[in-house]
Image (cartoon, rainbow, N blue to C red):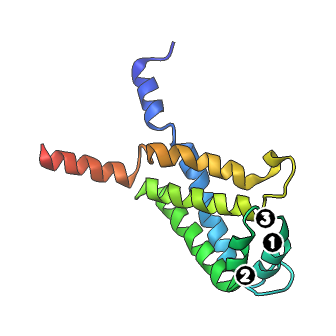
Amino acid sequence: MIPTELRERAARHALLPLRLFLGVTFVYAGLDKLTDPAFLSDSGTGSIGDLMRGVRDTSAVPWLVDLALKSPVGFAVVLAIGELLVGLGTLAGLLARIAALGGALISLSLWLTVSWQVTPYYYGNDLIYLMAWLPLVLAGAGYPSLDELIRSRRSRRTA
């Protein structure tokens, strides 16, 4: 039988592995995009432009792809910076619900565009990322996090 204190400690840290995985993954994805000159191009092998043109007709939301294609490089930079900020916020646990919502929205948009045509649907990794963000959207970062530290200091000041 597991002692109550150990169960409580495990429950407080339950979201930490998910936060670490998603945070590191999104920081890496953002940095990878920002440092890849092929990706940050309108056209060519590995470019955001070719990727978006390639998925346009199989996307669930072709209008969203059309919007991105108006400025593919600008879209790629915004996406990469968004991933980087979401990842850093998630790792630090700072504005964690907002960061997780950002991660969920990025994952949703990628699922509806880039991986929509993947069959069976569960092979598409963006849907899995979307579902992984939802516990953090609902519960926040948990412990340890900067959000928790700030909340703790505020409650001590008001007490």
Using the rendered view, name the quadrant where residue 55 is placed: bottom right
Q: Can residue 93 be seen in this view?
A: no
For residue 137, say whether it is visible: yes
Q: Name the residue under label 1.
A: 56
Mark 1 and mark 2 in contact (Cβ < 8 Å)?
Answer: yes
What's the amino acid at mark 3?
Answer: Ser
Q: Specify the amino acid type for callout 1.
A: Arg
Label 3 neighbour load within 10 Å: few <14, some 14-19, many 20+: many
Depth check, front residue: 4 or 122: 122
Q: What residue type is labelled 2?
A: Leu
Residue situated in front as seen by the camera: 47 or 55: 55
- The residue under label 2 is 69
**Residue at position x 54%, y 49% in the image:** 19
Q: Residue at x 45, y 58 (%)?
A: 98
Q: Residues within 10 Å of mark 1 (few under 14, many from 20)?
A: some
Left or right? Give the position of 146 relative to 47.
left
Secondary structure under the numbered disc 1 in the rendered image: helix
State if disc 1 and disc 3 touch (CB < 8 Å).
Answer: yes
Distance between the Cα atoms at labels 2 and 1? 9 Å
Q: Helix, strand, or loop for circle 3?
A: loop
**Residue 56 location (% of width, % of height):** 80, 72
In the image, residue 32 sits, relative to residue 116, either above or below, namely: below
Q: Which comes sooner in the sequence, label 2 or label 1?
A: 1
- The answer to which of marks 3 and 2 sits earlier in the sequence is 3
Residue 53 in picture, x, y percent from top left: 82, 77
Give the labeled residue for mark 3: 59
Between 57 and 124, the one lying in front of the other is 57
**Side of 115 relative to 139 (left or right):** right
- Coordinates of residue 117 in the picture (x, y in percent): 84, 58
Mark 3 vs mark 2, CA separation in Å: 13 Å
